[in-house]
Image (cartoon, helix red, strand yellow):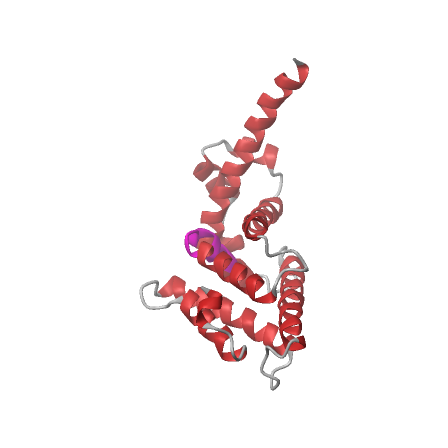
Amino acid sequence: MMASGNRGPYAKTAAVRRRVLEACVDAFGETGFYGATMKDIAKRAGISHTGLLHHFPRKEDLLLGVLELRDERGTEFLEAAKVLDPAADPVETLKGMIAVIVDNELQPGLMELHCVVSGEATSPDHPAHAYYADRYRNLRRFYADIFTALAARDGLRPAIDPETLATMTISLINGLQAQWLFDRDSVQVEYAIREFFLSVIPGLPRAALS
């Protein structure tokens, strides 16, 4: 009975924290980290300012919580697609990453958050600077491993080394997502990324990435 009683308050606390983080996605996506205020976030979440401070004493805590939420969603999606296994086929892994990017279009608030906050975070003093530095470093390694595996079986154009191609891939994705936020009718993120992969992986059937 005691364990059952403990689940109620815990579940309620988790639900409140989730609601606050969802409110932060909108607030940070609209005005950036510096432009958003704790009072505005509390209002968006439907709780008091004091209640917000109980769960997140500092605005930095909110930002880190939102970034963790974004990563959790992406990881859950990739795990469901079963492409995070090191033994997975590199082409299947690329397909999984494209699926994540497509899923991001269904959550424009998170995409806005990424574009705005990652731009702010280039400053070494920004609370998310270390997070994004690590994130981009890990993404470059992730894509470089995929392209290295493709190169090992002669599946990559020899003129481009895997590390450079990894950097190009991340730059393409970030640029396309930013453009999409400005013109969602004309910018075709998924199509452009597929065409890029097809251009650097010779012999790859078009159907392989669909």
Q: Is residue 185 above or below residue 2?
A: below
Residue occupying the point 56% across, 75% down: 168
Which of the 4 quarters of the picture holds residue 105? Answer: bottom left
Q: Is residue 45 above or below residue 205?
A: above
Residue 111 in the magenta stretch? The answer is: yes
Residue occupying the point 62% across, 78% down: 164
Residue 134 at x, y percent in the picture: 67, 61
Residue 20 at x, y percent in the picture: 51, 39
Answer left or right for 93 relative to 196.
right
Q: Which quadrant is the C terminus positioned in? A: bottom left
Which of the 4 quarters of the picture holds residue 186? Answer: bottom left
Depth check, front residue: 75 or 130: 75
Residue occupying the point 55% across, 52% down: 81
Depth check, front residue: 67 or 57: 67
Q: Is residue 139 above or below residue 66?
A: below
Residue 19 at x, y percent in the picture: 49, 37
Residue 144 in the magenta stretch? The answer is: no
Q: Which quadrant is the N terminus positioned in? A: top right
Q: Which residues are magenta?
A: 105-114
Residue 159 at x, y percent in the picture: 60, 86
Q: Is residue 110 above or below residue 18?
A: below
